[in-house]
Amino acid sequence: MNCDKVRNTLSIALGRGLEAFDGISEHLAQCRECADYAEEMSVMRGDLRNLPMRTPPVRLITQLQVLASREHMRRISRGTLPALMQFWIGELHLFFDNLMRPFAVPFAGGLLSALFLFTMLAPGLKYPQQTRNDVLLSGIFGQSQATFSALPPWAFSEDHVVVLVALDKDGSVIDYSIPNSVDAKMRNDIANTILFTKFQPATEFGMPIAGKVFVSFRRDKIVVKG
Amino acid sequence: MASTVLGLNSDGVPVGASRLRTESAACREDDELVRRLRAGEEAAYEDLLLRFQQPVYNLAFRLLNDPGDASDVVQEVFLKVFRNVGHFRRQSSLKTWIYRITVNEAHNQRRWFFRHRSREIGLDDEPEHIRTRNVPDSERSPFDCTFDREKHELIENALARINPLFREVVVLRDVEDLSYEEIAEVLQISLGTVKSRILRGREALRQELTARLEPEPAWRWAPE
């Protein structure tokens, strides 16, 4: 057995005992260099075995205990089917929360901007209001005035005359009174005018009611005083 | 301590009955621990830490030669063990499985170091023994303590300088006392490769130590 072969085998032989390998002990007894080599290897192995055990730092031990505790809780939270479902629902909820979070600030900003602009612009907006047939606010609490909407096409030739006209809830003329000083022709004209005039009854709480209206006649125009 | 010869291992070397009994008991203990871990018993996590935190840290430290990196690796190892214990198929012992994870994580850490931290300069470069508190041994003289400490430093430094592939097998064999078969399982290599790497690793370590221990000449000739 040559020196190279002995040295190659020594690596295994030192751990298992030289007796188990034929020829090595004899060679070491004869070869001084190989014996020194074996001695060095043996001492080196002994030193390696005697290296002190490195103790983990206290901080690492604490971190490992925390890690173990977390993993234990994690296993518990996913151990059973309901726990697993609850866990995944939580994860899903968190996922959507995180998904919507980037939109939250722009959405809130947009909404606030829109509200601000509307508040600033709303007072300046003017809408067409049709007040002709509206119920007057005062009519809710009291009797409003009767009005008329159309006059016959002829006019008068006399001076100023005031006529009191009584109307029913349909706007039809029930009665009227003309001063006695008015002559017959003008009385006839006024009567015709009143009969062919369309009146709108007064309203109370939005409902038409019977009422009276003063109608003023002049030569060139008619003035209505309620 | 006589042990009854019961069988031969893959090298054809006799294996004692007492060792087989010990291994069998360890296997049963491993199985029980794995079962409890899978069941989610809180005490099992603590038992696993108590049993393996020191060996794993020791192995990581020997492979990386840096306490901070070793701590990081140990945390990663136990995180993987806790999370993957359900996938442990019991084709090897629990110790071998955990050691395999440790070696792989040390590989990753070393790779990461060379990629990211190799150009960093640490501010805290004082050796660890200065920072740690050593309890004085009343039975040994200060000279013996100093001698041992220097010797250990010398070996650790030499160990850190050899090729990482060789360092792994030497540490697993000579420091952690794993068998050749266990080393082959841990490193996922063939038995022949294990033997070859151990041989070359020990030789590299011997040469490194020899070079360090050669006495410096008292004076040198210098050209005028």
Image (cartoon, helix red, strand yellow):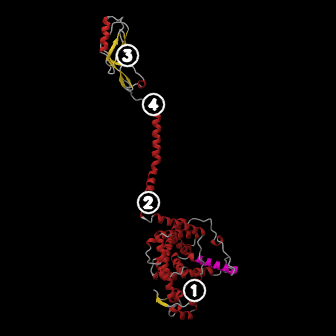
Q: Quadrant of the N terminus of chain B?
A: bottom right
x, y (%) of residue A176? 34, 13
Taking the spot 44% from the left edge, 60% from the top edge, the residue there is A87
Magenta stretch secondary structure, dominant: helix
Q: Out of B112 and B21, give the one closest to the viewer.
A: B21
Could you tell which of marks 3 and 2 lies nearer the N-terminus? 2
Which stretch did the figure color magenta? B140-158
Element assignment for label 4: helix
Q: Amino acid at mark 1?
A: Ser
Could you tell which of marks 1 and 4 lies nearer the N-terminus? 1
Residue at mark 4: A124
Q: Is residue A91 left or right of residue B218?
A: left
Q: CA distance from mark 1 to mark 3?
A: 135 Å
Which label was assigned to residue A23? none
Indicate whether residue B144 is drawn in magenta: yes
Q: Is residue B137 left or right of residue B71?
A: right
Element assignment for label 3: strand
Could you tell which of marks 4 and 2 lies nearer the N-terminus? 2
Q: Chain of mark 4?
A: A
Residue at mark 2: A86
Judge depth for marks 2 and 1 and give the one in front: 2
Q: Is residue B93 left or right of residue A153?
A: right
Q: CA distance from mark 1 to mark 4?
A: 102 Å
Q: Residues within 10 Å of mark 4 (few under 14, many from 20)?
A: few
Q: Quadrant of the C terminus of chain B?
A: bottom right
Judge depth for marks 4 and 2 and give the one in front: 2
Identify whether A123 is placed above or below A41. Answer: above
Disc 4 and disc 2 in contact, CB within 8 angstroms:
no
Q: Amino acid at mark 3?
A: Val
Residue at mark 3: A213
Identify whether A24 is placed above or below A191. Answer: below
Judge depth for marks 4 and 3 and give the one in front: 3
